[in-house]
Image (cartoon, grey):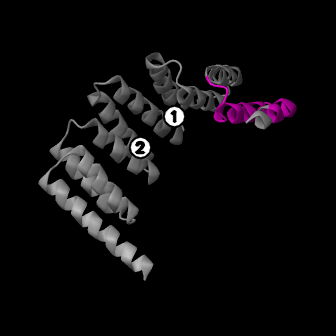
């Protein structure tokens, strides 16, 4: 019974969000409405809501990025990349540009375009050189390209910035493991 009540609540809230968006179109209302559809496992409806919102608000960077995020989660990496590139082209703020570059690098990595991902991450690091997430992602791309020394350099820098985070240590362990330096790998896994 409780599940039925929850299901009815989610459906009702989804309808409310769709009506709100129809009456007061804004990027936030569209994203909330798309989230509700996604939560109800209605990915087609979520995609439709975001697409309609983009038609109504073609300059909303967040809508492109959010639809790209939805597509990425659906395994539609090329479509997600297209939306991320469109969002990036419309970006005005540094934060939006950084988000777009990080998103597009993830999509490029997913379609195994590691050179493209490398370019995006290098551009993002020009904006924010001490961003640990960018350094960790860059190290993963370098590792995929067989540039282990550059991967290690990125991860060491990330650790120097903040030694309390576990991701750089874990990734450093993986890099050393792939280099068949298992003792060193274990040392970094233990530090994580």
The kind of secondary structure element at disc 2 is: helix
Query: Could you tell me residue 124's position as x and y percent?
Result: 45, 23
Q: CA distance from mark 2 to mark 1?
A: 11 Å
* Front residue of this view, candidates 61 and 86: 61
Q: Is residue 83 found left or right of 192 in the rendered image? A: left
User: What residue occupies the far right of the structure in this picture?
Assistant: 183
Region rendered in magenta: 162-187
Q: Residue at x 61, y 20 (%)?
A: 161
- Judging by the rendered image, the residue that carries numbered circle 2 is 78
Q: Is residue 173 found left or right of 158 in the rendered image? A: right
Query: Could you tell me residue 142's position as x and y percent?
Result: 62, 27
Magenta region, main secondary structure: helix
How crowded is the residue under tag 2: few (<14 C-alpha within 10 Å), some, or many (20+)? Answer: some
* Quadrant hosting residue 1: bottom left
| Residue 47 visible, this angle | no
Against 98, is 37 above or below?
Answer: below
- Judging by the rendered image, the residue that carries numbered circle 1 is 113
Q: Which one is earlier in the sequence, the residue at label 2 or at label 1?
A: 2
Q: Residue at x 43, y 18 (%)?
A: 127
* Quadrant hosting residue 9: bottom left
User: Is residue 181 found inside the magenta-colored segment of the image?
Assistant: yes
State the quadrant of the C terminus. Answer: top right
């Amino acid at each position: 019974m409780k599940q039925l009540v929850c299901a009815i609540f989610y459906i009702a809230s989804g309808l409310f969000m769709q009506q709100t968006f129809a009456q007061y179109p804004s990027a936030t209302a569209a994203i909330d409405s798309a989230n509700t559809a996604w939560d109800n496992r209605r990915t087609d409806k979520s995609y439709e809501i975001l697409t309609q919102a983009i038609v109504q608000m073609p300059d909303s960077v967040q809508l492109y990025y959010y639809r790209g995020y939805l597509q990425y989660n659906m395994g539609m990496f090329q479509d997600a990349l297209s939306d991320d590139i469109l969002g990036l082209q419309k970006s005005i703020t540094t934060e939006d540009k950084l988000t777009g570059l990080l998103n597009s690098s993830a999509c490029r990595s997913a379609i195994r375009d590691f050179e493209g991902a490398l370019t995006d991450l290098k551009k993002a690091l020009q904006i924010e050189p001490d961003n640990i997430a960018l350094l960790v992602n860059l190290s993963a791309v370098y590792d995929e390209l067989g540039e282990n020394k550059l991967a290690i350099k990125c991860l060491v820098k990330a650790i120097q910035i903040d030694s309390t985070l576990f991701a750089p240590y874990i990734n450093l362990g993986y890099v050393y493991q792939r280099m068949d330096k298992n003792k060193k790998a274990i040392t970094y896994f233990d530090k994580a």
